[in-house]
Amino acid sequence: MTTAETEARDAILTHHRALAQDVAVRVAAVARAVERGEPHDVALAELVSYVAGEVLPHAMAEEHSLYRVASTRAELQETVHAMIGEHRTLTSMAERLANGGSAPEVAATAMALGDAFGAHVAKENDVLLPWLLADPEIDLAQLLVQMHRLTEAAQRASSDVEDMTTPDTESTLLGLLLDAAGVLARSGRADPACRLVAAAWAVLRQPRPDLAARTTAELHRLVRSVTSVPVSMGGAQQPVPDGADDPSLDVRELPPALRHEVIFTTYHALAPGMAFVLVNDHDPKPLRYQFEAEHGGEFTWEYLEQGPRVWRVRIGRALPTTT
């Protein structure tokens, strides 16, 4: 390892440590204020401002530098995809905090954000960074310079004053689409309505997580109108073999807004032919529509238990079709 690489590694680790500590301090301030029954607005504003001004620009810069290089290696593609999903989860949590809520909800989301960010940084330090250092074709020092420039650019963009008089065209179009889906459901065609909303969610999930959250809420409402058999398996022709040791993912204790991101992150980490068992406190039919929209033909879905208090679903990544 060259001196430049050692310095680049140390700089990345130091920056990660500072970010994690700064987030943890701000999360603790929010939780402490809520626990004491004190006003938490100032602490919450400081947390949201720090995440928006420091953490998320850093995350976007990583995606276009470190992650871009790592994703060119087949053995790291799943890891990088999962870590990008974690960035989207952090963005979604920051937006929920910015929108406020009850004191317990704010505290729970803040602590979830702190835990998620800490785990994410640890994964970068322990998995991604050692691999980048071990690859002789990668110039980590140059990547660090690139990442710093991208971070500064993202911070400048996030600090620009937004013209609130400019209409949000995507939001307007989504509103029209959701209205149309509602009309479709009320006419007795709830299943196509759910498919339409799920398709919109798949399009918006990465570039507009705020609008994606809006479509998820509408999907939960519409799915109650579905009386027919749920959506098809999407053409998955090679079923996942039965596995007695499938890992279990219990999302019942997670805030509802976090569940889908955690589930999709778990799915993306599966190798073909593998599965996990989702444990939920309601029938996850909205999730199934979203899987159809984003992974049609690539997943399997098998109910193991269907209420009334607990639902268990075996979700797998289908084996490639044979010719």
Image: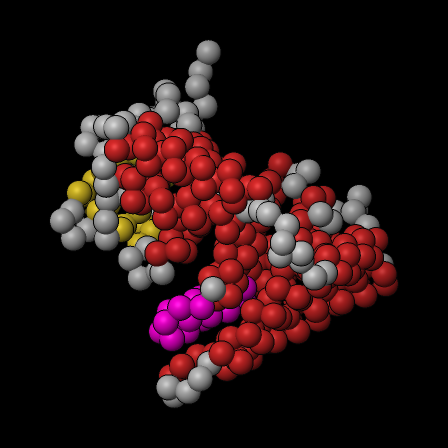
User: Residue 174, position in %: x, y?
Assistant: 48, 40
For the record, the magenta segment spans: 100-118
Q: Does the magenta portion include 239? A: no
Q: Residue at x 43, y 48 (%)?
A: 214
Is residue 61 left or right of 23 when viewed as pictured? right
Q: Residue at x 41, y 56 (%)?
A: 258
Q: Nearer the viewer, residue 139 or 264?
A: 264
Q: How many marks?
A: 0
| Screen quadrant of the N terminus | bottom right
Identify whether 102 is placed above or below 178: below
Q: Nearer the viewer, residue 2 or 111?
A: 111
The residue furthest front is 165
The residue furthest top is 323
User: Residue 96, position in %: x, y?
Assistant: 46, 62
Residue 224 can be seen, yes or no:
yes
Is residue 237 left or right of 188 when viewed as pictured? right
